[in-house]
Amino acid sequence: MLQPLPEFVGTASPRPDPAAQARVEMFIVEQYAAGRSLRQLPELTDRSFSAVRNILTRHGVHRRGAGAEALRQAGA
């Protein structure tokens, strides 16, 4: 289990500080684009799974499908 990064601990609230929220959102978008798992991001940012999904949606990030990429057959 991952621990929240120190800069994000305690920043989740119904009315978050706009600067802190912007940092969280930038981190989530960048890390997801770099390949970080949708399951890891809530743990690292001290946010709920649905909050992370909503942030990705708000930024127009298309989520990857569940599971690993299908293997390609040799010679295909």
Image (cartoon, rainbow, N blue to C red):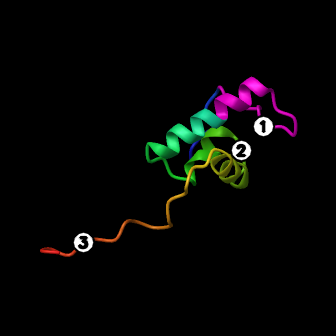
In this image, 37 relative to 12: left or right?
left
- Tell me which segment is drawn in magenta: 7-24
Whether residue 69 is in magenta: the answer is: no
In this image, 55 relative to 68: left or right?
right
- Disc 1 marks which amino acid? Ala
Within 10 Å of disc 1 (Cα), the crowding (few <14, some 14-19, many 20+) is some
Residue named by callout 3: 72
Whether residue 19 is in magenta: the answer is: yes
Is 41 drawn above or below residue 21 in the view shown? Answer: below
| Disc nearer the start of the sequence (1/2) | 1
Within 10 Å of disc 3 (Cα), the crowding (few <14, some 14-19, many 20+) is few
**Residue found 50% across the figure and 65% down from its top:** 65
Tags 2 and 3 in contact by the CB under 8 Å rule?
Answer: no
The total number of labels drawn is: 3
Within 10 Å of disc 2 (Cα), the crowding (few <14, some 14-19, many 20+) is some
Residue 66 position in % (x across, y down): 50, 67
**In the orientation shown, which residue stands out farthest toward the right?**
14
Is 25 drawn above or below residue 61 in the view shown? Answer: above
Residue named by callout 1: 12
- Magenta stretch: helix, strand or loop mostly: loop
- Disc 3 marks which amino acid? Arg
* SS type, badge 1: loop
Residue named by callout 2: 47
- Image-quadrant location for residue 15: top right
Tags 1 and 2 in contact by the CB under 8 Å rule?
Answer: yes
